[in-house]
Image: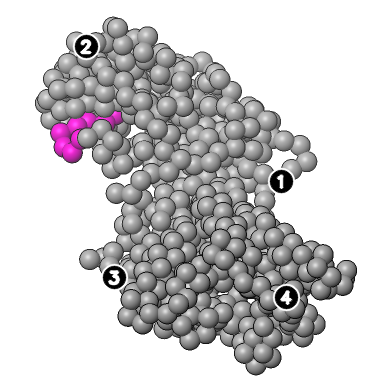
Amino acid sequence: MKKLVTLKKDYSIKLYSQMTKDKAPKYIYLPMDEKAKIKSDFLIKKEQRITNQGISPVSGRLIGSKYCDTVTKKNIKCFVILNDYKETYQKRRAALKNITSVSLEKIITELKQHNCISLSEKLKHSKKGCTLILNGMDDEPYVANEIFLSKEYYFEILETFDALREKLNASSTKVVMKCNDRENIENFENQMGTYLEMELLVLPDYYLIAEEQFLLPYLNLEDNYLILKPSEIKTMVTVVQKKHYPTEVVITISGNGIENPQIIETKIGASVKDLIQQYIKIKKNIDVIYCINGLLVGEEMDISNLIVTNDLQSIMIMKKEILESKECIRCGKCVSICPMNCNPKKGFDTNKQKYFSNCIHCGLCSYICPSKIDFKKIISGEKNETKVHEIPF
Amino acid sequence: MKFHFNFDYSYQNLLFFALCPLVFYGFYKNGILPYLQKDVSFLEMFRPILFPGCGFFIGWLVMKDNKKKNTINFALYGFLIGMILPIKSNLWITMFFLFFLFLLFRMKKMKKFSPLIFSSVFLLFLINVVGKIPFENQSEITHQTIYTISDIFFGRNVGGVCNTSILLALFGLIFLSFDYYYKKEIPISILISYTIFVLFLEFLFPSKDLLRNLLNSSTIFASIFLAGDMEYSPYMEKGKILYGVAIGLSAAFWNRITFSLGIYIAICFASLFIDFFDNFAIQLEKK
């Protein structure tokens, strides 16, 4: 494994220190079957199951359908729900004080019942006596979802994490933070007296260090571990302790094209366009582009029909700059920076996918390239337009 | 991709800064000193600056509207070529040939060759071998001068317009080594392998020029500023080292045949096989 790198960042992009909570969007769009029939003016209650996966995050009226985009799919038909702001629940269960009294099996079942399949599977496959890790780091530059969740809900997160430690009989418990996340480090240090078994580890601000495969060597771990993120613990709290469906997500809206970068907690199904109109001030007299899910791994998208889903993590609003890619100058930095030992240069020259066989789409090759070559296009199979002159022999 | 390392071709700016002290020294050695000794006229004093300056202008002129290539790259090529030519070369003829060669490279007529190295070898061969113009400046021709080893090290040496100072070239290497893009493995491996092979050759075929061979300012200058030319050198770590070693060995050999052109010929030949060095390095890494 190669050494990870620190990315150069524009420190003029500063996130607002408080998390904005958008609890009441006017319209909610929930994906539906193409053939489903809609009964107009149908009353919908909060947390009512509308489709197999679709749980209404608000109460209101079903007013029709509209074609929307998600991060992964385009033009999918969605129910449109007009929020009545009454928050009337279909069925409400009493919340628990904490999850200490709930067994691990019960937690897994509850998570499964509330559509949190991956998290329940993760807990199901964890072994007793494992090392429990709370990974409160974000990799993408200017994105701070996990950091802000840790900051906002640190008490609940630590309490639940400690309860899990007891249930899993964990051999050790580590809380991992990046060195530049000073506020959270301070918060956790203050709480460490209460949770004596927990160990706080501060890691350097390297890109990709939050990824499991790169984090483990830093922790000297090989097997028998369970890594959880603050967002996953928060979901556990919502489902098991508060007895609600996880209908809220945290997204970062940031970039050099806006005046007030911030973290917003909003409802699944809200319109991204409405969200930006309501909370974000775009800088005057500039053209902007919208980059979804990060500047390195994400892609540029049109947000006019985009809706908030579980897999939307960030919206980077950047000044539109025309970046002309030039001919490759054979500096070889794409090869030396690749953490997976791929050969982007050779892949670029030959258009062969075998040179990207280990690629994890981290975007570092495009980031470092002085000729601004978009390797992502080549990895996805598109032909490279800026073909380098090849030297024979 | 909307996020890039924010240093658009900083390497070229640094290279330019690293070359500036050499130009100033060249101006002093080949311009001011001969003028003070009344060997050249006042206007002729500025020849050491005119050569790199005109080279820079020609490189910029030829590539100025080529969007795919970086204009500054060719301007720097011109600047470097201007620095290695003999001071007594005819400026107009040299620059005409340089313009013509760069034009050929712009039209992609000679894809096999590195513009920098091929133009250097072509012009040096034309001036020094065909034209029989020596590397000495007017003072060195008029007054018989014998340079000591320390003279040679500090730059009082026979050589091109602005490439005689070994000390300043080594400072340039240290300065450029801090740049993220500079391929420092190449000059370091050239200099090490060159030294070892020169000593080895000296052991086999003794000559009286060991120190002169080791402190060859052209070899040191070319290995630091020319051999690591971004586009025409290997990009794999091991490939760079192998390439440097190959140049070092062949330069030691060529320097025995043609003292002033050895390193340029060595780089020119090696640059034809850069893909071989890269592929070899890829195969080594696979194992």
Q: Amino acid at mark 4?
A: His
Q: Residue at position x 54%, y 78% from top?
A: B264
Q: Earlier in the sequence, mark 2 or mark 1?
A: 2
Marks 2 & 1 on one chain: yes
Marks 3 & 2 on one chain: no
Q: Amino acid at mark 3?
A: Gln
Along the line of sight, the residue nearer the viewer: B110 or B98: B98
Q: Amino acid at mark 1?
A: Asp
- The region drawn magenta spans A221-229
Q: Residues within 10 Å of mark 2 (few under 14, many from 20)?
A: some
Residue at label 2?
A: A100
Distance from disc 2 to disc 1, alpha carbons, whole Å, reads 52 Å
Q: Residue at position x 52%, y 21% from top?
A: A19
Residue at label 4?
A: B143
Q: Is residue B42 above or below residue B205?
A: above
Q: Residue at position x 67%, y 90% from top?
A: B132
* Residue B211 belongs to magenta span: no
Residue at label 1?
A: A287
